[in-house]
Image (cartoon, helix red, strand yellow):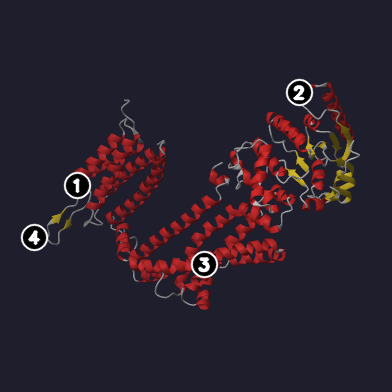
Amino acid sequence: MNWLKPSWQAALALVLCLIAVALGPIGAPKVDPLAQPAGTLIYPYVATNWLIFGVLLLAALISMARIPSIVEAVVLFIGAHLVAWLLIGGIAGFEGLARAPFFLLLAAAWLLGWRCVAVLSSSRPFAKWARTALRLIIPAIFGAWILIIWEAVTRGAGIPFILLPPPSAIGARIAGSLPVLGADVRQTIFKAVIFGYVVGSGAGFITAVLADRVPFLRRGLLPIGNMVSALPIIGVAPIMVMWFGFDWQSKAAVVIIMTFFPMLVNTVAGLAASGHMERDLMRTYASGYWQTLLKLRLPAAAPFIFNALKINSTLALIGAIVAEFFGTPVVGMGFRISTEVGRMNIDMVWAEIAVAALAGSVFYGVVALVERAVTFWHPSVRGG
Amino acid sequence: MTGTSPAVVAASKLGLTFQTNDGPVQALSNVDLTIGKGEFVSFIGPSGCGKTTLLRVIADLEKPTSGTISVNGMTAEQAREKRAYGYVFQAAALFPWRTIERNVGLPLEIMGLSKAEQVDRIKRTLDLVNLRGFEKKYPWQLSGGMQQRASIARALAFDADLLLMDEPFGALDEIVRDHLNEQLLELWGRTNKTICFVTHSIPEAVYLSTRIVVMSPRPGRVSDIIESTLPKQRPLDIRETPEFLAIAARVRDGLRAGHSYDD
C-alpha cells in the first residue's frame, strides 16, 4: 500500500462524486423558447456531464498516489478549477435549475482546492522566489474559491439579483462603469479621505506633543478628546454638511473628527513608552526637552503612531462614505451607494463596495509598508 | 591617600529620604565620602543599602534631602550640565533604532560636536572597548556582553574624567564578566579616569578597586571604607593570592557587621 497517500479531502471528494452520480442529472431541463416544435426540452451539461465526473475522479485519485507534492498540487489545482469552470459555464442559461448533484460536485471540487492549498502550505521550498510565490499563490487560491462558490451558488440556486448578484455581474458592472467609479474615487478618496486623514492625524499628533509639553493641556484636553471620540458619526455628519457645505470639505471634516482621537491617544501613550533608564541617560547628557523628544521619545513612540495611522486608514474611508449619505454633489462613493440602492442597482452598490475594499486595502498596505521600513528595529517587525 | 589631589566627589552629611505611600524611607543617611582623582572606588552592600542611590545623587539623577555634595568642585547639577561624568547603567540601554556607532555618537550629537569630530571619537572609543568592525550593527544583533561594552563606549565617548558605573556587568555570565573586568582595569590604567563602581560581588569589588566602600541598609549608610593594598597591575589570577583573599575577608566582615543587628 505504499503507493497510496490518502487524504481525507480527496477521499470525501470521491464519496461526494459517487453520490452525485447516483442522484442523476446535474440540472433540471427547461423548455427551449426558440425550438420548433414549441415545448422541446433542452438539457444542461449534455456535452460536459461525463467530463466533469471524469476530471474530478481522476484528480482525486491521482492526488492520493505517492507523487511529489508539487505534482500533487498542480494536479489538484487543475482538477479543482477545471471542474469549477465547467460547472459554472454549464449553468449559463439554466440559472436556478441546479439540482443536488451540482452542489455536491461543487463541494467535491472545493475539497480538492482545499487539499491543494493544504499541500502548498505545508511545502517548504528553499528558493526565496518560490517562497514569495507561495505567499501570493495560497491566498489567491483561497480568495478565488470564495468567488467561485459565491458565483456557483448564486447562479445555481437562482438567488434573486437584488439579494446577492454573482461576482461576474459585479465584475462586468465595474468594467462597464469605470468613468463613474473613477469620478467617485476622486471625489471621496483623493479629496475627502486623504485631506481629512492628513489633517486629522497631523492635528492629533501635534496636540499630543503639546499636551505632553504643557501640563494644563494634558489635564484638561485629554478627557475632552475622549468625549470627542465618543461623538456618534451619524449625528455629526449632517451638522458638518450644514457647516461646510455639500462638497468634499464637510466629509473631510467628519474624517478629521474620526481620525483625530486615535492619533492623540496613541501618541500620548507612545510618548510615555520610552524607558526610565533611557530617559535618565538623556538627563546625564544634559539633553534638553526637544532633543530628548526627537532622539529618544518620538522614535520610541513610532510603533504606537503607526498603529494609529493604520487604524485611521480604515476609519477615514468609513467616515467619508457614511458622511456622503447626508448630502453631496451628485458624485462620490457614499452618494452612489445610497442612490443606487434606491434604484435597485445592487450590482453597482457591490461594485462600489469592491472598489472601496480595494482602495482601503491599498491604503492600509502602504501605511504598513512604511511602518516596516521605519520601525524595523521593533521586535514585532524584526521577529524576536 | 589622595590628600594632595583635588577631590572629584566630596559628600558630607549626605542624606536622602524618599516619600512613599508607606511613609518616608531613608535611602541614605549621614554619608561622608571624598573621592580623589584617578581612584577606582567600589560601592558594595546588600540590596537596599543605597549604593545605587548614592551613585544617582552624584549624577544628579536624585536630589539629596540633607547634606552637601560637590562634583569637580561644583554642585552635582552644574556638573551634570557641564557633562562632567559618563554613566553606565545596569542594562546597556542602547537605542534599538540606532546602529552601534550612532549609539556611541548620541552624546556627541547632543553636545553639538562637528561631524568630523564625532566620527573620530566614535572610532577611538570603539577601539578602546574592542568593538571595531561592529559599527554598522544594531544593538539587538550583538550579544549582551558586546552591548554592555558599547554602552561603556558611549559613556567614554565624550571623554569625561569621571565614570559612574551602576552594576554594569550584573546581568552577564561570569566568564564574560571576568573578561570585561580585565578590560575595564586596563582601560582605567590607560585613561587615568576616576571610576565609581556599584556592585554586589565581593571578588569583583576587590579585583577592581583602589578603595572599597562597604554600605549597609536601613538606613543606607557607609559602614566601612577599605583601602586596597593590591598593585595597580592586576592579572586575573591575583584573585588567588593571600593578599587578595585577606581584603575580600575584610569586605565580607564589613558586610556582616552591617547586617548583624538585623538577625
Query: Residue at coordinates 78% horizontally, 27% vertically from top-left?
Result: B234
Type of amino acid under label 3: Gly
Q: Residue at x 62, y 65 (%)?
A: A225
| Letter of the chain that mark 2 sits on in the rendering | B
Q: Nearer the viewer, residue A262 or B54?
A: B54
Q: Are marks 3 and 1 in contact (CB under 8 Å)?
A: no
Q: Secondary structure at mark 4?
A: loop
Which residue is identified by label 4? Answer: A36
Mark 1–mark 2 distance (CA, rounded to whole Å) = 89 Å
Q: Position of residue B31 (x, y in %)?
A: 89, 43
Q: Is residue B263 among what the camera can see?
A: no
Q: Nearer the viewer, mark 1 or mark 2?
A: 2
Disc 4: CA contacts within 10 A as few (<14), some (14-19) or many (>=20):
few
Q: Residue type at mark 2?
A: Asp
Q: Amino acid at mark 1?
A: Thr
Residue, x 81% and y 44% (percent of image)? B53
Asked if the residue at tag 4 contacts the one at tag 3, i.e. Cβ–Cβ closer than 8 Å, the answer is no
Task: Please state which amino acid type lies under the numbered disc 4.
Answer: Gln
Q: Is residue A91 above or below residue A338?
A: above
Q: Which residue is denoted by mark 2 in the rendering?
A: B237
Disc 2/disc 4 C-alpha distance (Å)? 112 Å
| Distance Cα–Cα, label 4 vs label 1 | 24 Å
Which mark sits nearer the N-terminus, 4 or 1?
A: 4
Cα gap from disc 2 to disc 3, whole angstroms: 70 Å
Q: CA distance from mark 3 to mark 1?
A: 55 Å
Q: Provide the chain ID for the residue under circle 3.
A: A
Reading the image, the residue beneath label 3 is A196
The quarter of the picture where the C terminus of chain B appears is top right
- Asked if residue A109 shows in the view, the reply is yes
**Badge 3 or badge 1: first in the primary sequence:** 1
Label 4: chain letter? A
